[in-house]
Amino acid sequence: MPLLALDITNTQTAAQNFVANVNWAQPSWDLFIVLFFIIAGFLYGLSLGRDRVIVILVAIYMALAVVNTAPYIGNFQADVGIANVFVFRISTFVAVFIALFLLLARSALLRTIASADERGSWWQVMLFSFLHVGLLISIVLSFLPTTAVDKLAPLTRSIFVSEAGRFLWIIGPIVAMVMIKGNAADKKKFKYDI
């Protein structure tokens, strides 16, 4: 049996167990993560258009690359202690993300990606917003110490924290950006052909 089919079967079983064991009287962090994923995906998609979400995705990828490869972050993490590493890494990621987003919002990249200022069709907006929220959850959970990750439900670990899950959240938005072409490139092409 292929590894991906086995992982999907395990995820389905974990999802059924998760739904069967939801305790609304004492909600767990896993329930908050799943609800945040669903609600934020819908609200985020409704408030922003496709092109803006794509620019934000590019800023997230750049911030992740900067935080994961910065040479002095590891040394500073040793100084703040193991308990504060998560807070430091997520704070650094958010600060770098905001700085990059502000810089990209005023750069040629925004005009290249979102030159038509299209909101996109509803399914494109929802797809990109869910991929964006899932990527953010996966990144934040990857910064958690292993002791905290081990306390999450198997479904949450499988979808957001496992190697396969993190890989799929990293490449999912890239594949979606490549497969779904916006109208901006077409409008530019016709504009210069005239």
Image (cartoon, grey):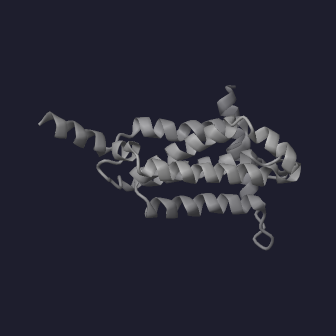
Outermost residue, top side: 1
- Residue 114: x percent and y percent? 35, 48
For the question of whether residue 185 can be seen, the reply is yes
Residue found at x 61% / y 57%? 37
For the question of whether residue 153 can be seen, the reply is no
- Residue 96: x percent and y percent? 61, 49
Count of number-bearing discs: 0
Quadrant for residue 185, please give it. Answer: top left
Figure quadrant of the C terminus: top left
Residue found at x 81% / y 49%? 85
Residue 73's place in the image compared with 45, above or below, is: above
- Residue 109: x percent and y percent? 40, 42
Near-viewer residue (76 or 152): 76
Figure quadrant of the N terminus: top right
Residue found at x 47% / y 59%? 45
Residue 25's place in the image compared with 36, above or below, is: below
Residue 68's place in the image compared with 91, above or below, is: above
Tell whether 177 sits left or right of 133. Answer: left
Outermost residue, bottom side: 25
Residue found at x 51% / y 51%? 101
Quadrant for residue 180, please give it. Answer: top left
- Residue 95: x percent and y percent? 63, 53
Near-viewer residue (39 or 93): 93
